[in-house]
Amino acid sequence: MRTTISNSQNNRALASSSFISINPVDGEVIQAFEALTREEIVAKLQASTSAYQLWKKESLAARQACILAFASRLTDQQEAVAQLITSEMGKPIAQSLAEVKKCIWLCAYYAEAAPDLLAPKVIETTAQKSYLRYEPIGAVLGIMPWNFPCWQALRFAIPALLAGNVVLLKPAPNVALTSIALANIFKEIIPEKAIFQCLLAEVEDIPSIIKHDLVQGIALTGSDVAGAKVAQIAGAAIKKCVLELGGSDPFIVLADADLETAAKLAAKSRMNNCGQSCISAKRIIVEQAVLDEFLPLFKAALLAMKIGNPLDLDTQISTMARADLRDNLNAQLEDAVANGAKVYLAGGPRQGKGHYFDPIILTEVKPTMRAYHEELFGPIAVVFSVADEVEAIRLANDTKYGLGAALWTKDLAKAERLASQLSAGAVAINNLLRSDPRMPFGGIKQSGFGRELGLEGIREFVNIKSVAIYKLMK
């Protein structure tokens, strides 16, 4: 899975590019890559143009066969790909394996569902016959982050490819190896068609790529700041974009909830990928009547989780991906404590190698603190106390984000009523929130717009063409 390069090549790449894979456990450089030159970017775009002209003419059955072949090879290489994920960004290996397996499921789901999802839809009109066709539009550029380097790349790419588009993947600078591995699998399957290419392009080259005639769709997962910039460029070029921009997801525990299960799953959700997940339970909102019972359960669940080497299968919390991410999280923590937040479970950055950050529980976080308004992308859990369900919903919605939410109560009728009041793209009732290939995924407000996954995801980057056939007039 890994390309071997000489020390001199590695030194040149270190000096000339931000695409550097560094093991976050020991700080060692795994491999560095020179960014593509403008000429190399143009060559890749030209290769995509040629590939698109052929790929869009392939039958859906041929596209399905390609995706299934990709899934088969990914299955064969799942341990190697998981090792890449863990080595590049520090995710516990069990979670990396789960990420790869989820990608295999994604491929299987879309390959099976594509004929129904992309089938022409008959519409009753005054015409003799009228229907909708779902046709490819060109290349979809994916600008992807580092925290789920396999899943986030493939959740936009697989439906786009099945629809007849081609894909250009611009990965985060620290996970190039994982992205290149995915591109190489596609190259092994269809060497003559560049339907999935990895673009190691610098940030300053992104606008020109978006403006290229072939590129007709942009999928970005990242910060709201990055999303605003990409949306501005795409809008000026009249290009469709789908943005998933993070969240500060509420995890609401009402008085009649199963507290023990809620506490365990709140801990699991918050600490997944060392807390570096857009849909983790970042704000735990607990009804006052059960707060004193819930907090010890939640603390015990966090303390029971094993922190350690990400290559150990039983490790549940590992190192954060980068030093700057750990330092920013610590700055948010220090701001909260300095302004009156209480530490219910002490933790924070560890000394020594790696970017380890022990879990923390904060209470009494106020709107004057960064931790109230900003996304905490790491192992800090903020627990809020509310008087009742009305205050719980108000607090849950008091954020610029709107990606996901979780709601815990034994009263399912109440749960569905309250779910309709939550400003979020997805709500899980009596469980932690997960993405699912069968269900659309995305947010509202500053969490972005558009959807990935499900029916809605595969139809984001297609031309929905209306066809109406009328009888000839005599």
Image: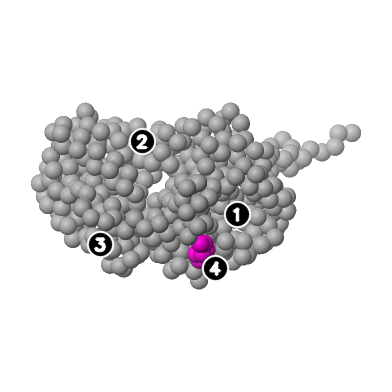
For residue 398, which quarter of the picture? top left
Q: Is residue 237 above or below residue 408?
A: above
Location of mark 1 (residue) = 196
Which is the main secondary structure of the residues drawn in magenta?
Answer: loop
Residue of label 2: 401
* Residue at the outermost bottom position: 76
What SS does tag 2 mark?
Answer: loop
**Mark 1 vs mark 4: which is more N-terminal?**
4
User: What's the residue type where badge 1 is placed?
Assistant: Phe
Residue beneath disc 4: 73
Give the alpha-carbon distance from disc 3 to disc 2, as whole Å.
32 Å
Q: Earlier in the sequence, mark 3 or mark 4?
A: 4
Which label lies toward us, 3 or 1? 3
Towards the viewer: 358 or 15: 15
* Marks 3 and 4 in Cβ contact (< 8 Å): no
Q: Residue shown at 35%/64% (left/top)?
A: 93
Residue at disc 3, secondary structure:
loop
At 10% from the left edge and 46% from the top edge, which residue is drawn?
Answer: 292
Q: CA distance from mark 3 to mark 4?
A: 30 Å
Q: Residue 414 placed where, x, y %?
A: 27, 43
The reply to whether discs 3 and 1 touch (Cβ–Cβ < 8 Å) is no
> Type of residue at label 3?
Gly
Residue numbers of the magenta segment: 1-6
Of badges 2 and 1, the one in the foreground is: 1
What is the spatial separation of the Cα atoms under label 3 and label 1, in whole angstroms? 35 Å
Name the residue beneath numbered marker 3: 308
- Near mark 2 (Cα within 10 A), the count class, few <14, some 14-19 or many ≥20, is many
Looking at the image, tell me whether mark 2 or mark 1 is earlier in sequence order: 1
Residue farthest to the right, as pictured:
474
